[in-house]
Image (spheres, helix red, strand yellow):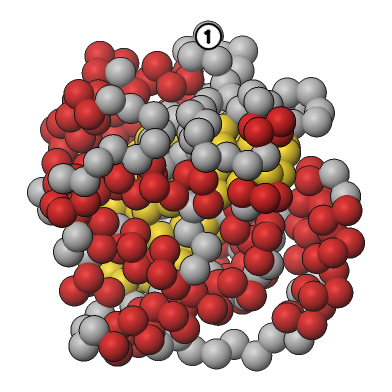
Amino acid sequence: MIGLLESLARPLLRMLDPEDAHRLAVQALKFPPFVKLVADDPRLAVRAFGLNFPNPVGMAAGFDKNGEVPDALLKLGFGFVEVGTVTPLPQSGNPRPRIFRLDRDEGVINRLGFNSEGAAAVLRRLAARANEGGIVGVNIGANKESADRIADYVRSIETFAPVVSYFSVNISSPNTPGLRELQQAKMLDQLLARVMDARTRMSREAGTTPLLIKIAPDLTLGELDDIVGAARRHHVDGMIIGNTTVVRPTALRDQATAREAGGLSGRPLFALATRMLAETYVRVEGAFPLIGVGGIDSGETAVAKIKAGACLIELYSALVFHGLRLVATIKAELSDALRREGHASIDELVGTDAAAMTAERWPV
Ligand SMILES: Cc1cc2nc3c(=O)[nH]c(=O)nc-3n(C[C@H](O)[C@H](O)[C@H](O)COP(=O)(O)O)c2cc1C
C-alpha cells in the first residue's frame, strides 16, 4: 500500500521545489494509510545508552524538525526518530530557495539555517505523545542571534528532558555561522561541562536522558582526537557521525547545483562520513556507542556503516530518491546479511572493519 501510494506520488513530488515537496510529505504523514505493523526480526534489536531499539534504522534530524509526525514515522518502520533541530526561540532560517536536489548524484544540498518553530511549540507536540512509547530523540541547536549559544543548549535540555528518549547536541550544522566552532577543544569543553550538568540536574525529575553529540564529517583527525577526548572525559553517552559536508567531491555530476552553498548529504557523502565514523570508532575504544549517518541508501551501505563502527544508523536524503519503502528494504537486507554471515545480532558486526578502513586511502 505504501509502495503503491509512493510510486504514484513520487514523480509528482519530484516536480515540486524540494522544500514544498518536503512540506507535502510531512503533511501527508499526518494522515498515514493504515499499515499493519510487522514485528521486526529480533536479530535487528539493539540495546544502546540504556534504550531498547526494535531495529537500528533511525530517521535522521532535519526531516521532522518540529516534531509533527514522529509516531507516523515509527509506524512506518523506523526503529527511532530524531526530531529537530529545534532552537529555543522560533526562527525562520535562511531565504528560499535553500534546498537543492542533485538528481544525478542522488545528493542534496541544504542551507536551511535552523528554521524552527521553537522549543515551546515542539514541546507541546512531544509532551502530547510522551506516553505513546517508541524512541523519539530531540536534536537541539542554538538560535542564530543568541548571545550565549551554550545557554541555548542548556535551556533545551531543561525543556525537553521529561519528554524525549535522548538528546542529540548539534554542533555541526554548517548553516549557522560560527556554530561549528563549538567543536573546538576549549569551547567543546565548556559546552560539555554545562550540558552534562544540566542533564544531571534534570535527572532528578526526568531520569537520566542519554546525551549524544553530533559532529561534522569535515574535521581534521587532530580535531577528532580532541573531540573524542572531551566526549570521553565528560562521559557523554554517544556520538553521531555525522552531519552534512561543506566539501564537494570532485566526481559530482551535477556540477552546477554543486556550487550552491550549504551542506551536502546523500550518496556523495557516504565515503567521507563512513571513514570519519571508522576513525571515531577506533578512538572511542568502546567507551560509548556511535550512530552512523551519511549516504545510507541500501542494505549494503547500512552494513558498511555498522562494520565501520555504528550500532545504530540514520538516514534522510536517500528517502528523497527511493521513498519511505527503503526503510523496509534496508531492514530486510540487514536481516539477510546477518543470516548469511552467521551472526545472531547487529552487535556482532559493529566495528569489525573499522581498523582496516582507517588504513585505506583518504576518500576524495
Ligand atoms: C534538508 C535537510 C535538512 C537537515 N536538517 C538537519 C537539522 O536540522 N539538524 C541536523 O542535525 N541535521 C540535519 N540534516 C542532516 C541529516 O540529519 C544527516 O546528518 C545528513 O543529511 C546525512 O545523512 P543522509 O546522507 O542520509 O541525508 C539535514 C539534512 C537535510 C538533507
Residue furthest to the top:
147
Hey, which quadrant is residue 363 in on the image?
top left
Query: Can you give x and y, in whole percent of width and height, for residue 14 in the image?
Result: 82, 56
Give the residue type that dot 1 points to. Ala
Hey, which quadrant is residue 337 in on the image?
bottom left
Query: Can you give x and y, in whole percent of width and height, for residue 312 in the image?
Result: 36, 62
Q: From the viewer's perspective, is residue 307 above or below residue 141?
A: below
The C terminus lies in which quarter of the figure? top left
Of 353 and 208, the residue lying toward us: 353
Of 312 and 356, the residue lying toward us: 356
The N terminus lies in which quarter of the figure? bottom right
Query: In what element is the residue under mark 1?
Result: loop
User: How many marks can you see?
Assistant: 1
Q: Which residue is pictured at 80% across the width and 31% down the height?
A: 97
Query: Can you give x and y, in whole percent of width and height, for residue 310 in the image?
Result: 30, 58
- Identify the residue under disc 1: 147
Q: Around disc 1, counting alpha carbons within 10 Å, would you say few (fewer than 14), some (14 to 19), or many (20 or more)?
A: few
Q: From the viewer's perspective, is residue 36 above or below residue 349?
A: below
Does residue 96 appear in the picture of this structure?
Answer: yes
Image-based side of 80 in relation to 44, left or right: right
Q: Which residue is pictured at 34% across the width and 23% down the height?
A: 183
Of 177 and 265, the residue lying toward us: 265
Does residue 158 appear in the picture of this structure?
Answer: no
Hey, which quadrant is residue 352 in on the image?
bottom left
Q: Which residue is pictured at 29% across the width and 88% down the height?
A: 340
Query: Can you give x and y, in whole percent of width and height, for residue 37 in the image?
Result: 59, 87
